[in-house]
Amino acid sequence: MNLSSLGFALELAAIVTLVILGERDKDGFATLAEILDRVMATRAARICILTFWWWLGWHFLFSQTVAP
């Protein structure tokens, strides 16, 4: 296993741990739904997130299919 795979595995473990702790202790951590509600509350944030997903899809999914 290379260093990148190890990094992604550690990030996944951290995310799972924080989600479990957020569901267990309501006062300690915000749940994922609460975070998304707060992030998506403004129009500017929704436009930024949409632009980010468009950029990600264009550079990593679509551009590889149209390359010569």
Image: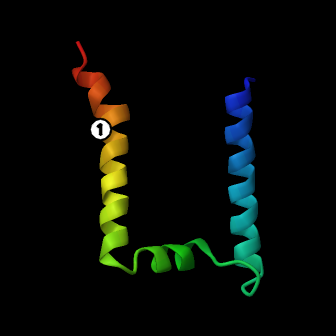
- Locate residue 38, reporting x and y percent: 48, 80
Question: Residue at horizontal 76%, vertical 71%?
Answer: 21
Quadrant assignment, res 35: bottom right
- Locate residue 51, reporting x and y percent: 31, 55
Location of the N terminus by quadrant is top right
Location of the C terminus by quadrant is top left
Name the outermost residue toward the bottom.
Answer: 27
How are the residues colored?
Answer: rainbow
Q: Which residue is mark 1?
A: 58
Closer-to-camera residue (58/65): 58
Name the outermost residue toward the top.
Answer: 68
Q: Assess disc 1: are there few (<14), some (14-19) or many (≥20) residues with their C-alpha within 10 Å of its C-alpha.
A: few
Secondary structure at numbered mark 1: helix
Question: Residue at horizontal 72%, vertical 85%?
Answer: 26
Depicted 9 relative to depicted 15: above or below: above
As drawn, is 4 to the left or to the right of 45? Answer: right
Type of the residue with mark 1: Trp
Question: Residue at horizontal 70%, vertical 76%?
Answer: 23
Depicted 39 relative to depicted 49: above or below: below
